[in-house]
Image: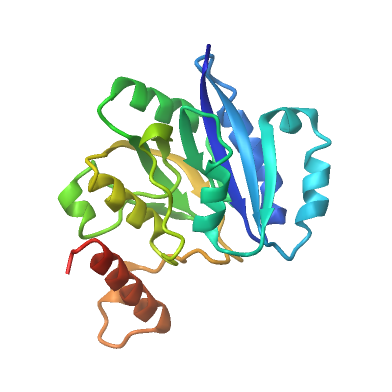
Amino acid sequence: MKDLISVVIPVYNHAHTLNNCLKTVINSGSKSSQFQIEIIIVNDGSTDNFQEVMEKILKNDIYKSKIKKVLSQENKGAPAARNLGFKEISGDYVVFVDADTICYSSMFEQMYQTLALSPEVSYAYSQFKFGWKKMKSHVFDGELLKKINYIDVTSLIRTKDFIPFDKHIKRFQDWDLWLSMFEQGKIGCFIPKILYKKIVGGRQGISSWLPSWFYKIPWKIQKVKEYEEAKKIIFKKHGLI
C-alpha cells in the first residue's frame, strides 16, 4: 500500500489563487508511484467568493478525487485553520500549503525521498521564492534556529512527529513550531533547491519580506517594530532571552 501525504490548505480571502495552487499540488503529487495525496481545505472565515470558486473546483473530477474535505470556521487565523485541517488527515506525512503557493512539479517527490533516506529526521524543508526574491535557508542547525528562522511552514512533516500550532502566536508560527519540535529532539533536513514559490501582492495575514538593511537603520518603520515585538514573543516563550 502506498504512503499517503496529506496536504492542508488554509484559505483566507484567496479564492483567486486557490485553483492554481490546487493544480500545482495535484501535479506535484502525481509523479510518484510511491505515495498518494489527499487534500484538506480550510476556509478561515473568508469574505470573498470562496464558496463560488469552491463549487466550480469540485465540478472537476480530478480535483474532487483528491480533495478529502472542505472545512469552514470563523476567522481565527492560520494556526487554528491548520490545526483544524490536521485533525482530519489520514496521511503518514503532512504538509501545510498556503493558498497562494505554487508547488513545483518535483516538490513532494524530493521532500518524500529526503525523509525516506533520513529516518532520523522529522521533516524536510527547502528553499523557495517569495515573488522574485529567493529566500535563503540553511542546513539544519538547532543553535542557529534559536537565533533566526530559516525554515518555512511549507515543509513535509512526519505526522507522528507534528506538534499542533500555537493559536496564540500571530507571527512566526513556523518558527515557533520548529523550535517546539526541536525542544522534543525532532529535527529537519534541508533540501538546497527551490521547490515552490509564493505569490506576492494582496497577501493578508502573512508577513511581507523586507530587505535585511531595513532592520539595521537607526529609525524603524512600523513593520520593523512589529517584527521585533513578534521576535521577543518567540524568544520569551522558548526561554531564549
Instruction: State the residue at coordinates (61%, 31%).
Output: 38
Give 85 or 225, whichever is nearer the viewer: 85
Left or right side of 181 for 56: right
Q: For the view shown, which residue lies furthest in the top direction?
A: 1
Q: What residue is at 18 percent from the left and 64 percent from the top?
A: 240
Q: How far across and how far down the image is residue 29, in percent?
A: 56, 27
For residue 131, say whether it is visible.
Answer: no
Colouring mode (rainbow / by chain / secondary structure / one colour): rainbow
Up/down of 206 relative to 87, above or below: below
In the image, residue 53 above or below residue 125? below
Residue 2 in the figure: left or right of residue 165: right
Q: Quadrant of residue 28?
A: top right
Q: Is residue 177 positioned above or below 231 on the image?
A: above
* Residue drawn at point x = 48 percent, y = 30 percent: 108
Considering every residue shown, the one lying at the far bottom of the view is: 219
Rendered location of residue 60, percent (x, y): 80, 33
Residue 89 image point, x, y percent: 56, 35
Q: Nearer the viewer, residue 26 or 120?
A: 120
Q: Is residue 140 above or below residue 147?
A: above
Image check: 92 left or right of 62?
Answer: left
Residue 119 position within the rendered picture, expressed as x and y whole percent measured from the top left: 29, 24
Q: Quadrant of the C terminus?
A: bottom left
Nearer-the-camera pick, 226 or 193 = 226
One can see residue 175 in this view: yes
Q: How many marks?
A: 0
| Rendering quarter of residue 232 | bottom left
Residue ID at (39%, 77%): 226
